[in-house]
Each structure stands twice: as structure tokens, then as C-alpha cells.
């Protein structure tokens, strides 16, 4: 079945980087875009960016430009989100989501990856 | 801070209807018909209920409907059921080739 499976929880120190993976299965990976969305504990959804899994083109939210990088490996159908210079406010559940419906960030969602920034 | 605004909470009795508003600007909701609505139950991933303002994905009840007027989009849930109690988020594509979410609305079924 169509699914996105994300990597496990991470604990990082302030100033470090984290790389979260999102492995797709059950569909043609390169035919869809992947969004990354995060949710801090008890807070709302926040959009980080989008990647075209076919050609690798990306668009990032203004406040994350310079800190976030989205890439993919088409040989393993895996998308990656790298966030650098972590601070405590980056503690959140990070989701990848497929754009299977036009201009809608997520018909299929990963299970989420908890990233805790802790000194 | 979200670029879209939503009411923090809405409450209504079982079987009744509610409408949740989502107000943006002429650079997002007002410019494109690219508004989506997501339902999120505690501890679960969001689920898309409406996309492109009015479209329901396969499997979504027709009790959920969407509309838009100017810079404001709306989600209406009719015949409220217990399972509709959740957080609801709107999102929109923007003229900066980005997306933005609203802050979310907590729906309580009385």
C-alpha cells in the first residue's frame, strides 16, 4: 500500500544538525512532490518546504531558508530533510507528506519523527 | 505566527452544523483556489478533508464542505458527530511559491 515511513526519534544539542528520512513505497516516487511539516508540542502545523521528487527542485518557507535542505535519493525512493543550527524552538514532530492532490500538502503522511533539541 | 487566521475554538451540539473560517490575504487565499482543510485527532497525523477549496478526497463524508469568498475560506461540517471532535487546520498556496497553515481550530461536540 502507499506509505511513507520516517526515521526514528532524534535528540540533538543546540547548534547541531539533524537529518530526517522519509522512505516512500507503493507508488512512483518521482511522480510526486513531498512536503515537510512540523508540529511543536501542543502547537499547530508549520510548513517547512516542498521538494519535487522528480527533478529535486525545492521551495522553502522564508523563515527556514539558509537552515533547511531537502534532498532525495531516487534509487531508494527516500526523501531527506536536513535542518541545521538547531535551537530549542526546533523541538517538534517532523512529518513528511506526499502531495497526491494538487496544491494540497498531504494526502499521505509519514508517522512523524520527534526531534528534541536539548542541552 | 501564522499568516492565516482561524478561530481558536468552536463548539456545537451533536447533529448541528458548524462553519470554521480561515482568513488570509490577496497573496494566498484571495489569489489561488488552493485551500485545503486538515483534520487532526490527538496523537495522529493530519488528514486532508478538503482540497482546492471545495473538493473532497475519496472516502471523505459529504458532511464536510468547503467554500471561499475573497480572502476568506470556510469549512462547514454538517450533522456533527462525536468523531468530528478534533483540531482543524486550513492551508493555502501563496504567490511566493510556498504554503502556509492556519493556527488551527479546536472543534468540540457537545
Image (cartoon, helix red, strand yellow):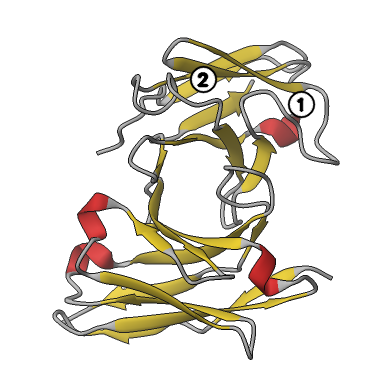
Image: A99 above or below A34: above
Residue A33: mark in rendering: none
Q: Residue B97 versus residue A49: which sits nearer the camera?
A: B97
Front residue (pair A91, A29)? A29
Q: Position of residue A33 (x, y in %)?
A: 57, 61
Name which quarter of the figure residue B22 lies in.
Answer: top left
Q: Chain of mark 1?
A: B
What is the crowding at mark 2: few (fewer than 14 residues within 10 Å), some, or many (at least 20)? Answer: some
Can you give x and y, in whole percent of width and height, for residue A7 in the image? 53, 83
User: In x, y percent, where is residue A89?
Assistant: 21, 62
Is A101 on the left or on the right of A64, as rendered?
A: right
* Quadrant in which residue A98 is drawn: bottom right
Above or below residue A109? Residue B7 is above
- Residue at left offset 36%, top offset 64%: A92
Q: Mark 2, chain letter?
A: B
Quadrant of the image containing the N terminus of chain A: bottom right
Tell me the crowding category of disc 1: few under 14, some 14 to 19, or many 20 or more residues within 10 angstroms, Cα based. Answer: some
Q: Which mark is residue B10?
A: 2
Q: Residue at x 47, y 30 (%)?
A: B105
Amino acid at each position: 500500500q502507499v506509505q511513507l515511513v520516517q526515521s526514528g526519534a532524534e535528540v540533538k544539542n543546540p547548534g547541531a544538525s539533524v537529518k530526517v528520512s522519509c522512505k516512500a513505497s507503493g507508488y512512483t516516487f518521482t511522480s510526486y512532490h513531498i512536503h515537510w511539516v512540523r508540529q511543536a508540542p501542543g502547537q499547530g502545523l508549520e510548513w517547512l518546504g516542498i521538494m519535487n521528487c522528480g527533478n529535486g527542485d525545492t521551495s522553502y518557507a522564508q523563515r527556514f531558508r539558509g537552515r533547511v535542505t531537502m534532498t532525495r535519493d531516487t534509487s531508494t525512493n527516500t526523501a531527506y530533510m536536513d535542518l541545521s543550527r538547531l535551537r530549542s524552538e526546533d523541538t517538534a514532530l517532523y512529518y513528511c507528506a506526499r502531495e497526491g492532490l494538487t496544491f494540497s500538502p498531504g494526502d499521505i503522511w509519514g508517522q512523524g519523527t520527534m526531534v528534541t533539541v536539548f542541552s | 505566527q501564522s499568516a492565516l487566521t482561524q478561530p481558536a475554538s468552536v463548539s456545537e451540539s451533536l447533529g448541528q452544523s458548524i462553519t470554521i473560517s480561515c482568513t488570509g490575504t490577496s497573496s494566498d487565499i484571495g489569489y489561488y483556489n488552493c485551500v485545503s482543510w486538515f483534520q487532526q485527532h490527538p496523537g495522529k497525523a493530519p488528514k486532508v478533508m478538503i482540497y482546492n477549496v471545495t473538493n473532497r478526497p475519496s472516502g471523505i463524508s459529504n458532511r464536510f464542505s468547503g467554500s471561499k469568498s475573497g480572502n476568506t475560506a470556510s469549512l462547514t461540517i454538517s450533522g456533527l458527530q462525536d468523531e468530528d471532535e478534533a483540531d482543524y487546520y486550513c492551508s493555502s498556496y501563496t504567490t511566493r511559491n510556498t504554503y502556509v497553515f492556519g493556527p488551527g481550530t479546536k472543534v468540540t461536540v457537545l
